[in-house]
Image: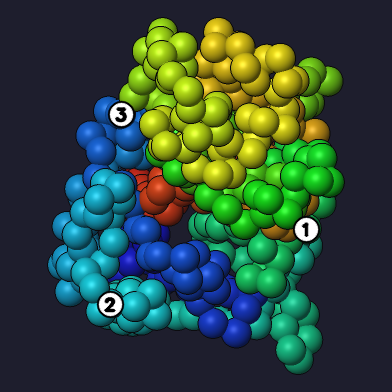
Amino acid sequence: MLACSLDSRKYAVSIYEKNTALGRKFLVAGKGGFNLTHSEDVGQFAERYTPKEFIEPFLKSFSNEDFRKWLLSLGIETYVGSSKRVFPIKGIKPIEVLKTIESRLAANSVSIYFNHEWKGWNGQALVFNTKDKPIEIQPDITVLALGGASWKVTGSDGQWGQYFKSKDIHVVNFQPSNCAFHIEWPKMLIDAINGLPLKNCAFSCGDKRVRGEAILTEFGIEGSGVYPLSVNVRKQLAEGLNSIIYIDFKPDFTRDEIHTRIENRGNKSIKEFLEGNLKLSKQQTALIKHFTTKDDYHNAEVLSRSIKGFELKVSSLAPLDEAISTVGGISLKEIDDNLQLKKLPNHFCIGEMLDWDAPTGGYLLQACFSMGKYLADKLNQQ
């Protein structure tokens, strides 16, 4: 986005790419449904980020609506799905979007050098490993967009941190975000729940509550309904606290309503009532039964409380490389308002290599595109 937006009359723009092609993570992200951004109001949009204050100026400069208009100007029409997420119209594949952006790069006279892996500095010069030999270049302006530390297969390994540390630039250790949570299930329960969804639920941890879906797995729980809880779960685990996810199986009912219905169930068994009248799934019923004593299972007050606030103890996060995204990287204290490193003039950092966090749903991509456009606009004004 930065290279597409820089003024080619002012700058000779070159991209040095570690891989043999651009956008490997972009394409991998597209395999699960190519969610480019989200359609919600930009004011609410900014609330999804941590820290909000860091990302908000970039979103105001280049919003989700601006992004959709930019894509349309390239011939990529988008639509808003039922989840309010934004996708290319049916039939447009991720590779087509990438190739369209590459065509824009070519039109902007951008040079691309593949198989160039950045290996830090030699004095003021940038050092790259290539297939043939190491090379050094000394540009007037350097923009680093080195990514996070998840999905190593795409080239994001976070190993670049060592080069910044050698320049006395603080790098926050990477941690998983938007990832599965490990739950130590009773062995007898795993076969009954493994691979099954929890639909139409509300998930909460600390002050965060999200309506959505999740998948129960042998490892634990994952999915769009719980990914936004990563910030709170990670914080609690880091502080040595018990991290508890609460699941509201019937978010459209109050606890009193459920309590009354249970008491007035007549001759129906609890299981028949939960699955027949309350429409809980078999996996939801299995969870409640396995984590509730026999007496509590037949106690309307306790059972209704469990349905509205079922507790799951998280023991750990998924491994770093299995996370959809990461938090950590260059400390935000190391850059100024224009994304320039305070200790290295004319060196800028953008994207996931900076220490910010966002949920899935188009927020990660939008922030990266917004940062690229924001910095391009600033550089064009110089």
Of mark 3 and mark 1, the one earlier in the sequence is: 3
Of mark 3 and mark 2, the one earlier in the sequence is: 3
* Closer-to-camera residue (70/247): 247
Residue 54 visible in the shown view: no
Q: Secondary structure at mark 2?
A: loop
User: In 3D space, how far apart are the residues under numbered discs 3 and 2 (Cα atoms)?
Assistant: 28 Å
Location of the N terminus (image quadrant): bottom left
Left-right relation of 106 to 50: left
325 is higher (above) or lower (below) than 334: below
What is the basis of the colouring in this image? rainbow
The kind of residue tagged 2 is: Ile
**Which label belongs to residue 92?**
2
The kind of residue tagged 1 is: Gln
Q: Residue sitting at 73 percent across and 21 percent down? A: 294
- Extreme residue toward the bottom, this view: 132
Image depth: mark 3 or mark 1 in front: 3
Coordinates of residue 152 in the picture (x, y in percent): 71, 66
Q: Residue sitting at 27 percent across and 28 percent down? A: 43
Coordinates of residue 335 in the picture (x, y in percent): 57, 35
Residue at label 3?
44
The kind of residue tagged 3 is: Gln
User: In 3D space, how far apart are the residues under numbered discs 3 and 1 (Cα atoms)?
Assistant: 34 Å
Coordinates of residue 314 in the picture (x, y in percent): 74, 32
- Quadrant in which residue 134 is drawn: bottom right
Residue at label 1?
159
